[in-house]
Amino acid sequence: MKTIGLIGGMSWESTAVYYRQINEAVRRRHGGLASAEILLRSVDFSRIVALQQAGRWDQAADALARIGNQLAGAGADCVLICTNTMHKVADAVAEKAGVPLIHIVDVVGRALADAGAKRPLLLATRYTMEQDFYRTRLADRFGIEAMVPEAADRGLVHDVIFEELCCGIVRSQSRQGYLDVIERGRAAGADAVILGCTEIGLLIGPSHTDLPVFDSTLLHAEAAVDFADGLLSPAMQAA
């Protein structure tokens, strides 16, 4: 197998899911005691959040790009940024790393397209929902017009991510709040739901709604194993 490079810690709660899901997928595929070849670099999330809040995406890009380069230098054959929001700087990371970057939006977009979803509801951080880097890539590459919740619902989704899920807190009332947001999205025409923050799968999943659910964390982890096994399309291996 090829070696998977993970840029994690954003937050470590979801990075732990990546590590588990990647290794479980390898064990399912290869059996026995098989596990993944992984290099993991976990950052201090508080420093990244401070840069996000200050709008210093250039500094955040430099920090993650250096890490991507370090992973490649240590033997990683590919790089994953284990967060949706920081794919805003994916091009810089891919360029500096010099190895394929498995882009989370491309992985999610391919799954949506294969399922015939046209107008999914995107649940994510404010940065991902309100800036254009995520939805524009879905539209340009896959013809998918992602919806976002109304302003108050975007605030709720964002706050639960940072104040609860990133801190390992899972509350039933927050789950119900998310489900209410999903129902309002359905009423507005959503035909699927993107869990577009890597922590959201800790709170809700396919069992909580009858709309098709696309968990970016699980899809991204599976794509990493496809790469390690030599099964990932070249089109999915670059920013």
Image: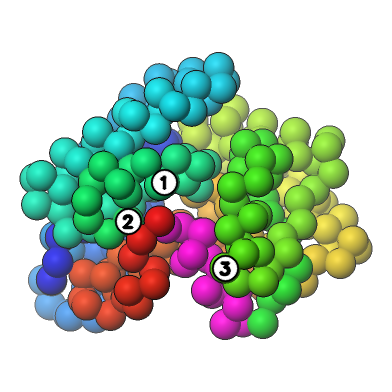
| Figure check: 14 above or below 50 | below
Mark 3 residue element: helix
Residue that appears at 22% across and 55% down: 99
Question: Are there few (<14), some (14-19), or many (20+) residues within 10 Å of tag 2?
Answer: many
Disc number for residue 90: 1
Front-most of residues 236 and 206 = 236
Quadrant location of the N terminus in the rendered image: bottom left
- Magenta segment, principal secondary structure? helix
Tell me the distance, in whole angstroms, between the alpha carbons under discs 3 and 1.
Answer: 16 Å
Front-most of residues 197 and 80 = 80
Is residue 99 found inside the magenta-colored segment of the image? no
Residue 225 picture location, percent across and down: 28, 69
Residue 210 picture location, percent across and down: 73, 73
Residue that appears at 14% across and 66% down: 2
Quadrant location of the C terminus in the rendered image: bottom left
Is there CB contact under 8 Å for labels 2 and 1?
yes
Q: Which residue does the numbered mark 3 point to in the structure image? A: 141
The residue type indicated by label 2 comes to Leu
| Figure check: 119 above or below 94 | below
Task: Quadrant for residue 115, please give it.
Answer: bottom right
Front-most of residues 68 and 156 = 68
Does 18 sit left or right of 88 as displayed?
left
Tell me the distance, in whole angstroms, between the alpha carbons under discs 3 and 2.
Answer: 16 Å
Q: Which residue does the numbered mark 2 point to in the structure image? A: 101
Residue that protrudes farthest toward the right in the picture: 187
Residue 184 visible in image: yes
